[in-house]
């Protein structure tokens, strides 16, 4: 197994400084957003600008160079009180059949659904699938790329989110509650909102440890 590091390479921190020095200003700003973005679980008690978020989503979609079917990809924003109640009930209906949730009294489950409904905005990311695995893979890849760009655009406006891909998103009760068609798949749920306090950053694995360099000017490379 490769060690995911070029033999004799510089320390990760030095590599990051070198990369930063050759980046144009626009790329440096993007790099800053990528480094600083955090998962936000505690949201400010304020509404989010839905139209602005929709514009960010469209801009994020324009950044995806992959060939995919835009008609087979859709997003649902649950931003109104009624919409969030609907989403909260569907989410907890799915959770209530999982693990310890199965033993919780109905009143507790309803209370938790009410807490979910307090999230400023809930977004469902949905793709249409068919019998072509290559098509399905491209749709998932495109959706993931759009979400990544969207999270950075939102972060620039001090809007954070949780990207939920737990197994519960495959639950039929959740799909039905959110109104998915039979040929549609729920990729993830996004819990979106502004934040008052930035959480502390956690230690991250240096990017240099996640790739292997084969060959190169030094004639040395990662082990295969």
Image (tube, rainbow, N blue to C red):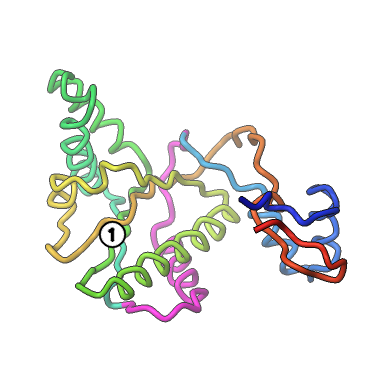
* For residue 94, side relative to residue 208 (left or right): left
Residue lying furthest bottom in this view? 67
Decide which of 7, 184 is in the foreground and name it. Answer: 7
Residue 166 is one of the magenta-drawn residues: no
Dot 1, how many residues are within 10 Å of its Cα: few (below 14), some (14-19), or many (20+)? few
Residue 179 spot, x, y in % from top left: 15, 57
Residue 143 spot, x, y in % from top left: 39, 65
Please report the residue visible at 16 percent of the width from the left and 24 percent of the height from the top.
Answer: 102
Decide which of 160, 167 is in the foreground and name it. Answer: 167
Residue 57 is one of the magenta-drawn residues: yes
97 up-or-down from 31: above or below: above
Residue 7 spot, x, y in % from top left: 80, 54
Q: Choose top left, top right, bottom left or bottom right for residue 98.
A: top left
Q: Choose top left, top right, bottom left or bottom right for residue 9.
A: bottom right
Please report the residue visible at 34 percent of the width from the left and 52 percent of the height from the top.
Answer: 188
116 up-or-down from 139: above or below: above
Q: Choose top left, top right, bottom left or bottom right for residue 211.
A: bottom right
Q: Secondary structure at mark 1?
A: strand
The residue to which callout 1 is attached is 76
Please report the residue visible at 57 percent of the width from the left and 52 percent of the height from the top.
Answer: 155
Residues rendered magenta in the picture: 42-70
Quarter holding the C terminus is: bottom right
Decide which of 133, 121 is in the foreground and name it. Answer: 133
Numbered label tally: 1
* For residue 86, side relative to residue 22 (left or right): left
25 up-or-down from 5: above or below: below
* For residue 115, side relative to residue 58 (left or right): left
Residue 144 spot, x, y in % from top left: 43, 62
């Amino acid at each position: 197994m490769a060690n995911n590091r070029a033999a004799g390479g510089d320390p990760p921190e030095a590599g990051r400084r070198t990369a930063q020095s050759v980046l144009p200003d626009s790329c440096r700003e993007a790099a800053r957003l990528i480094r600083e973005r955090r998962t936000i679980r505690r949201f400010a008690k304020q509404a989010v600008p839905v139209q602005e978020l929709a514009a960010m989503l469209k801009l994020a979609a324009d950044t995806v160079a992959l060939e995919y079917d835009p008609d087979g990809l859709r997003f649902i924003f649950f931003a109104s009180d009624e919409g969030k109640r609907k989403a909260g009930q569907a989410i907890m209906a799915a959770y209530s059949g999982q693990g310890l949730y199965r033993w919780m009294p109905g009143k507790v489950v309803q209370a938790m659904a009410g807490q979910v409904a307090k999230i400023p905005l809930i977004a469902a990311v949905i793709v249409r699938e068919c019998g072509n695995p290559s098509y399905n893979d491209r749709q998932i890849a495109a959706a993931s790329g759009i979400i990544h760009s969207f999270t950075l655009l939102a972060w620039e406006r001090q809007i954070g989110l949780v990207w939920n891909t737990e197994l519960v998103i495959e639950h039929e009760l959740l799909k039905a509650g959110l109104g998915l068609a039979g040929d549609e798949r729920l990729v993830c749920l996004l819990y979106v909102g502004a934040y008052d306090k930035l959480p502390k950053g956690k230690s991250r694995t240096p990017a240099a440890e996640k790739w292997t360099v084969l060959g190169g000017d030094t004639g040395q490379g990662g082990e295969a």
